[in-house]
Image: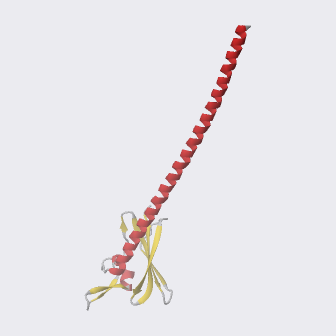
């Protein structure tokens, strides 16, 4: 009987140890799973932030290129492409009249431009006194990532708003 009691006591201890081990193992697995899910959520959040910032940087670069194009148009003269310079030339002063554009040159001499990963889709001229809008289409390409940049200018001494639409190549 003594040996049976001893065996029962040993068996009870082993069972208690096994129960404690099972509880500890279950607790460890749950904690590990929660930690992994927390890390996964954190990594996905960081990935989302990086993607968002990348899109913002691409949009800023596109806007910067559009501003450069419209600045070139209103501050320079280029007889080959009015998009790169459409200012009137003052022969007395021997310089271009910045912010005073030549309408006929804009209409007839504007040619499409594709530089690296963007292109100029269209130029819109809105005469402020009559609200007449004229759109000069430069490209038939389609893009979902486009930006418009507007500037107040004079076109043949009439107050206008020039709008250049630039788009990112897909």
Q: Is residue 3 left or right of residue 163?
A: right
Choose between 106 and 32: the one closer to the eye: 32
* Image colouring: secondary structure
Q: Residue at x 46, y 73 (%)?
A: 148
The percent position of residue 116, horizontal first and vertical second, equals 36, 63
Choose between 141 and 46: the one closer to the eye: 46
The percent position of residue 117, horizontal first and vertical second, equals 39, 63
Q: Which picture quadrant has residue 107?
A: bottom left
Q: Is residue 86 above or below residue 49?
A: below
Q: Is residue 5 above or below residue 161?
A: above
User: Can you say which quadrant of the picture contains the N terminus?
Assistant: top right
The percent position of residue 58, horizontal first and vertical second, equals 43, 62
User: Can you say which quadrant of the picture contains the C terminus?
Assistant: bottom left
Residue extending farthest to the right is 1
The percent position of residue 85, horizontal first and vertical second, equals 33, 79
Q: Residue at x 57, y 42 (%)?
A: 35
Q: Which picture quadrant has residue 6?
A: top right
Q: Which picture quadrant has residue 95?
A: bottom left
Q: Is residue 1 above or below residue 130?
A: above
Residue extending farthest to the front is 2
Give the total number of marks visible in the rendering: 0
Residue extending farthest to the bottom is 92
Q: Residue at x 60, y 38 (%)?
A: 31
Choose between 16 and 88: the one closer to the eye: 16
Q: Is residue 93 left or right of residue 118?
A: left
Q: Residue at x 47, y 55 (%)?
A: 50
Q: Is residue 115 above or below residue 110?
A: above
């Amino acid at each position: 009987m003594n040996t049976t009691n001893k065996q029962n006591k040993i068996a009870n201890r082993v069972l208690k140890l096994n129960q404690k081990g099972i509880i500890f193992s279950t607790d460890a697995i749950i904690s590990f799973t929660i930690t992994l899910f927390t890390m996964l959520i954190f990594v996905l959040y960081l990935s989302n932030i990086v993607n968002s910032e990348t899109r913002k940087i691409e949009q800023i670069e596109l806007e910067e290129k559009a501003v450069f194009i419209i600045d070139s148009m209103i501050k320079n003269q280029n007889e080959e492409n009015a998009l790169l310079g459409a200012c009137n030339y003052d022969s007395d002063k021997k310089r271009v009249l910045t912010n005073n554009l030549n309408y006929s040159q804009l209409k007839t001499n504007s040619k499409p431009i594709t530089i690296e990963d963007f292109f100029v889709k269209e130029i819109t001229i809105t005469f402020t006194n009559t609200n007449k809008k004229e759109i000069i289409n430069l490209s038939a390409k389609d893009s979902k990532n486009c930006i418009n940049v507007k500037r107040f200018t004079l076109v043949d001494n009439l107050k206008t708003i020039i709008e250049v639409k630039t788009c990112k190549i897909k």
